[in-house]
Image (cartoon, grey):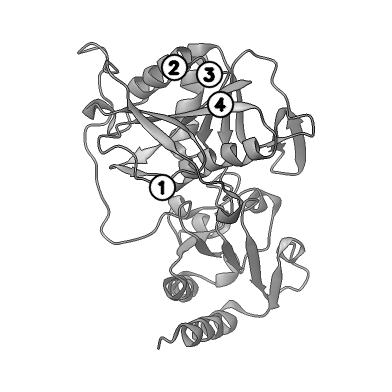
């Protein structure tokens, strides 16, 4: 029986959806035959854990100390490494967010664990866990079974449908004495600068409307923003659109950007290079809008519309608002 620890990432007291997905993925695998006990670690969770947010069962250890409320790499790494040792965890699971990708190697060095980055996990018919990841811009898929005694898995976003999750009781337990002696760390984070506006994080959004070079520029992205607003979603971009300066880097989706797993992904003017497809492998329904009928994006799309973005997107938005009863 494996002992599994899940790092639950929070930001300003709000649990990240990507971490909830990791927890729920483990609960689903247990239902499918994985023999494991699952526990969680919530650094800086001063307000505890919202009831009913996590499925299945297990104990979440909460480190409430203010030291952990904002991400401090060395402090978090020491905390998680200590928790792995104290719980006797064989495997640590982390969401492959920007924080997770920064933190995982630090913990790996502290506990001598193997690290499988940007992966998915599943269970074979014998009940054994294995990981899958990709190389060479997503063109090569491999199955990984680490041989180290302890393993860290950094999971890419993959939403688990709520219908596949079991109800249960998740307990919380305060992690007493989790603060290190004063002066052990020199905090790297000294100030938080917030951008004005209410832009959604593309990794948290259930709907993502993304644009590429085929949008034609900033004016084309204005159409995408309007459609995303109608759908209650977020706007993403391909690398080419970011390189052109049309969108900020935090909206870039793909191998050198971010991975997303929305229920609905609408790709507008995106050709579908393997580097971009590597970032949307966890998406549910994919809709592609492109003037080129031979664009690679159509090979992975569930629905495809051949046409110009500036003509198709406004009509899509009009249809959406009509269904929703909006003007």
> Residue 89, which numbered label?
3
Q: Nearer the viewer, mark 4 or mark 3?
A: 4
> Residue 37, which numbered label?
4
Instruction: Kindly report the distance in space between the C-alpha atoms of the residues bearing marks 4 and 2.
Output: 18 Å
Judged left or right of residue 230, residue 146 is: right
The residue positioned 59% from the left and 55% from the top of the image is: 163
Residue assigned mark 1: 52
Instruction: Kindly report the distance in space between the C-alpha atoms of the residues bearing marks 2 and 3.
Output: 10 Å
**Location of the N terminus (image quadrant):** top right
Instruction: Kindly report the distance in space between the C-alpha atoms of the residues bearing marks 3 and 1.
Output: 24 Å
Q: Earlier in the sequence, mark 3 or mark 1?
A: 1
Q: Earlier in the sequence, mark 2 or mark 3?
A: 2
Front-most of 126 and 303?
126
| Outermost residue, front side | 168
Q: Earlier in the sequence, mark 4 or mark 2?
A: 4
**Location of the C terminus (image quadrant):** bottom left
Q: Quadrant of residue 313?
A: bottom right
Instruction: Kindly report the distance in space between the C-alpha atoms of the residues bearing marks 2 and 1.
Output: 27 Å
Q: Secondary structure at mark 1?
A: loop
Residue assigned mark 2: 81
């Amino acid at each position: 029986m494996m002992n599994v620890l899940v790092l639950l990432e929070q930001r300003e007291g709000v649990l990240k959806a990507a971490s909830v997905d990791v927890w729920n993925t483990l609960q689903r695998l247990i239902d499918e035959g994985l023999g494991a006990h699952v526990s969680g670690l919530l650094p800086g969770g001063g307000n505890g854990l919202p009831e009913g947010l996590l499925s299945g069962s297990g104990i979440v250890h909460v480190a409430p100390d203010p030291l952990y409320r904002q991400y401090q790499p060395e402090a978090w790494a020491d905390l998680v490494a200590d928790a792995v040792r104290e719980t006797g965890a064989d495997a640590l699971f982390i969401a492959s967010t920007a924080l997770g990708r920064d933190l995982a190697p630090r913990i790996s060095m502290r506990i001598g664990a193997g690290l499988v980055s940007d992966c998915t996990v599943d269970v074979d018919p014998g009940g054994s866990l294995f990981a899958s990841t990709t190389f060479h811009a997503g063109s090569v898929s491999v199955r990984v079974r680490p041989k180290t005694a302890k393993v860290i898995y950094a999971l890419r976003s993959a939403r688990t449908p709520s219908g596949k999750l079991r109800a249960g009781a998740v307990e919380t337990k305060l992690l007493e004495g989790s603060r290190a002696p004063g002066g052990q760390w020199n905090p790297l984070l000294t100030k938080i600068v917030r951008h004005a506006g209410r832009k959604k994080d593309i990794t948290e959004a259930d709907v993502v409307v993304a644009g590429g070079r085929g949008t034609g520029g900033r004016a084309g992205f204005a159409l995408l923003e309007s459609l995303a607003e109608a759908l209650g979603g977020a706007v993403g971009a391909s690398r080419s659109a970011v390189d052109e300066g049309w969108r900020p880097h935090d909206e870039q989706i793909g191998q050198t950007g971010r991975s997303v797993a929305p229920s609905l992904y609408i790709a507008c003017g995106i050709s579908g290079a393997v580097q971009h497809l590597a970032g949307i492998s966890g998406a549910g329904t994919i809709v592609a809008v492109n003037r080129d009928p031979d664009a690679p994006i159509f090979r992975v799309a569930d629905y495809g519309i051949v046409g110009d973005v500036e003509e198709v997107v406004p009509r899509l938005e009009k249809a959406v608002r009509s269904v929703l009863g909006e003007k």
